[in-house]
Amino acid sequence: MRDNRQLRRTRSDSDRQCFTALYHDHALALLGYGLRRTSNEDAVDMVSETFAVAWRRLQDVPAGDGARPWLFGVARNVLLNQGRSNRRRNALTQRLVAAVEQVAPDETAASDDSLLMDAALKRLDPLDQELLMLTCWEGLSPTEVAEALDMAAGTVRSRLHRARKNLRRLLESTHAAPTTTPGERCND
Amino acid sequence: MTDAEIDRRLTDSARVTDDQLVQANLAESLDDLLVGTMALDPNERVQPQTPVLEKKRFARPLLAAASIVVILLMAAIAVETRSDGPDSSTAYASELIDFAERSPKILIDDVSWPVVRADETEYGGEMSFRSTSDGADLHWRSETLDELIQSRLVDNVDLGILPVLDTSARVIQYRSGEITALWEHDSTTLEFRAGPVDVDTFAALLRQLRTVDTGEWLDAMPPSVIDRTSQPDAIREILADIPVPADFAANDLDTSAVVSDEYQLKARVTGAAACAWLDQWFTATEAGNVPAATEAAAMLATSTEWTALLDIADEGRWSETVWQWADAVNGGPGVATGGGPQPPTREMSASALSCSDQGS
């Protein structure tokens, strides 16, 4: 009979170093991802839960560049499944929530143009919203977006193309003129 | 507005930037969380993080399939109907026949590449095909073939000529790996784009394109196209449990030209109702008309029970936004902005709920 104790996961010093590096490389980016989508409390909960999943499934986290889209994929699913009734707040997350409260909101995000953009985004298909936000806000490449969302890279590119077109149509159908200067396209 | 401008505006709209987080003093509390996480038992059961949204999206085709049957039956029985020759087994509403007749009736001759959308645009129209792993688009455009070829050749690679249907297409590869084919068809410039893909696969896909008659083309259309003719009914259904002011013009809500998605239609209709009540609230508040302001606030408070908002609450942030405004005019903390909660104003409602679009 197989000894069930052999199935139990343990964490070596090497695992701990690896996880610490993973956390330092990506925790802030994941926190930003959460804060741009949800409340401070839910964003911190998401970061906590995402790294708890990574800690328990360390063997599944891809090495190198693959770790980032993997973590964003977990983070997105955590947010989608985040029930307001079953938050697991603890002292550690509360401390981070308090620290995040000190982050000054971006003044440009309160501009009419940003509100207009927010309203237009909300009227897009939810998956198209996410594709645009992962590309422009999180700086993920289409390939990384594809890995995070478990989609084909070609599908991501064609949907991004369509999403931009729909967003443009919604923005141009509103009364306000764009107030920004031309820039580079996000990451594709 | 170029793609770059769209992206710039979107990037600028982020509530919090990574630079702000880097500058904030978060290191100590983040390190605490790291230590706390590594103290967890790695054998504790992990809840599977299944994407809720994807589950719902996969479930949609079943609902859509059911609705298309109803809609097609209605189209066959109640609406002015036309058939299109002996091959057409289904009768379609005249608007759809007209749409088909304005469109190039081309499909990919492979059931694993269904049409997933079709739309008319300011420059012509487009339809999208999707296999299990890849996508392709067919565009029909107002530019001449020469104009389009010249614009596509800028910064891209000319792959020469490939056969398509009964003619030949100029084929160009983008740096991203996508490939596009351009040709003329019935005096219309067509562009078929797919990828990233290798040339042989793209050539095979081009060979699978075929022209069909109007009936077969409409048979291949997804519900998002067929549903357009049922928008007045769908709007009435959405409004069934939504109170609206006496002068609310439901007939002005037909958005067939710009909306083809159920989420967007529900967002537009509920937005119009919310905007109408907000308009009454602002007007009454400014005039000191307490009964009218109270009525508007009370009607907005019922939005938490509007079926359409409840239906789409998990699919995006629209419902939450409407409810936030309902709270704001009922003594709530205000409307969330990048600068914190603010008292509701007409200008903010125009931006947040597109109220200027809703005719209020």
Image (tube, coloured by chain):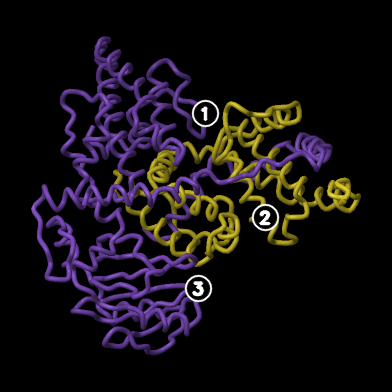
Q: How far apart are labels 1 and 3 at the CA level?
A: 43 Å
Mark drawn on residue B196: 3
Q: What tint does the image give chain B?
A: purple
| Foreground of the two, A75 or A181 | A75
| Display colour for chain A | yellow
Q: Residue at x 14, y 55 (%)?
A: B93
Give the letter of the chain under mark 3: B
* Local crowd size for mark 2, using a 10 Å CA cut-off: few (<14), some (14–19), many (≥20): many
The three-letter amino acid code for the residue at tag 1 is Gly
Q: Position of residue B105 (x, y in %)?
A: 23, 71
Identify the residue position indicated by label 1 in the image.
B340
Element on which disc 2 rests: helix
Total count of labels = 3
In depth, the one of A46 and A4 nearer the eye is A4
Q: Position of residue B220 (x, y in %)?
A: 28, 64
Where is A159 relative to B347, above or below? below
Residue at 73 percent of width and 41 percent of height:
A52
What label does residue A68 carry, if any?
Answer: 2
